[in-house]
Image (cartoon, helix red, strand yellow):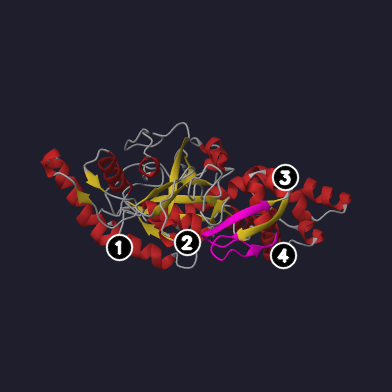
Amino acid sequence: MLQIGLVGKPNAGKSTFFSAATLVDVKIAPYPFTTIEANKGVGYVKIKCVCSEFNVQDNPVNSKCIRGFRFIPVEIIDVAGLVPDAWKGRGLGNRFLDELRRADVLIHVVDASGGTDEEGRKLRPGQHDPLKDVAFLEKEVDMWIFQILKKDWNTLIKKATILGSELSRILAERLSGLGVKLGHIQQALSESGLEDIKKARDAGDEKILFFVKLLRQYSKPILIAANKCDIPQSEDNIKIMMKELKGKYIVIPTSSISELVLRKAAKAGLIEYLPGESDFKILDEKKLSRKQIDALEYVRENVLKKWGSTGVQESLNRAVFDILETVVVFPVENEYKLTDHHGRVLPDAFLVPPGTTAKEFAGLIHSDLQKKFMHAVDARTKRKLPANYVLKHKDVIKIVTRR
């Protein structure tokens, strides 16, 4: 399952974001290191389901379809807040950086109100610059990767020389536990000028760190969830963040607490609300107290009308679909009825990396399907698709195998 890591300093709202996205109850309190053990749960990315295009009633198995929207599961991991020099082990540093090894993408939850210092201690809103938190997080992840790589750098260079192997492949073997792919390393080596083994051997710390920074950008891409957007001081800070980080990061105005309120109210049957929507409907005011109605109206006026959504669902979606460029594929066994062998309509929706071929996709479903692969069939056109056909977003395909 695709994994999203939630990162940031203490008290920025990560655990609230996690709870809102997963509806898993976690400790949420206004002081550092409330999260001691990493929280793991299932959240969902949201797309317009193809069931409406085909005009069918679907029967989801590995996902959910609500009002024509398909919600596809992703794993979300919320680690303890990171403080300066976490990479050295300060606070709960290295232990929790290690939790991010397999994350495909990171969502950096930033206190956009400027109401917490670099350690996560409470301040009056507006007293801290959120941009400093962005730079701090970059440094912590960079130094974490750097220290892992630096101690073995000369040994890795020597190994590549003796074996006559490409340095990228030796580095990929060393960093495989961090979820770093060969393509990430090749791209970073090329841009840092370290493709040549001789230049890599002579590289100093500054050059290696430059390579690491590039590697982090490609292997651990980051989206900024500018949290606490309902607080007045956040508005100007978010505008500044969007301007200063334009072209480098996607910045999403976010109110995790508002999303948590809406999802819990919807789960209790008090309101009608679909994650990511710009409004909600109270189903029966008589079941709500005055305090609850006021809280819901606060969310409507200060978050939904102002920013268009709470930002939680948009953060998940954009991290997966815009940053990772993931595509959704619907496999079926009957291309005419869009069913599996149990007769269920459009039962599954798979998240696959960009560039995945039909044959590779068969292997993601089951290794035997890839071994016996003959061709695929496009359920829309009924055309045969070759093994090297590159899957597109919302493709509905049948895998045909040898008997």
Instruction: Look at mark 3 in the image and give the residue it sits on.
Output: 174
Distance from the alpha carbon under mark 4 to that under mark 2: 24 Å
Question: CB atoms at circles 1 and 4 under 8 Å apart?
Answer: no
Q: Amino acid at mark 4?
A: Gly
Our reading of the magenta stretch's main secondary structure is loop
Q: Amino acid at mark 1?
A: Asp
Instruction: Look at mark 4 in the image and give the residue it sits on.
Output: 193
**Label 3: element kind:** helix
Residue 211 appears in view: no
Distance from the alpha carbon under mark 1 to that under mark 4: 39 Å
Q: Is residue 118 shown above or below 99?
A: below
Distance from the alpha carbon under mark 1 to that under mark 3: 43 Å
Distance from the alpha carbon under mark 3 to that under mark 2: 28 Å
Q: Which residues are magenta?
A: 378-400
**Label 2: element kind:** loop
Between 64 and 215, which is closer to the camera in this rendering?
Answer: 64
Sequence-wise first label, 4 or 3: 3
- Is 98 placed left or right of 41 in the picture? right
Instruction: Look at mark 1 in the image and give the residue it sits on.
Output: 236
Sequence-wise first label, 1 or 3: 3
Between 219 and 123, which is closer to the camera in this rendering?
Answer: 219
Q: Position of residue 32 (x, y in %)?
A: 38, 37
Distance from the alpha carbon under mark 2 to that under mark 1: 18 Å
Sequence-wise first label, 2 or 1: 1
Mark in the foreground, 4 or 3: 3
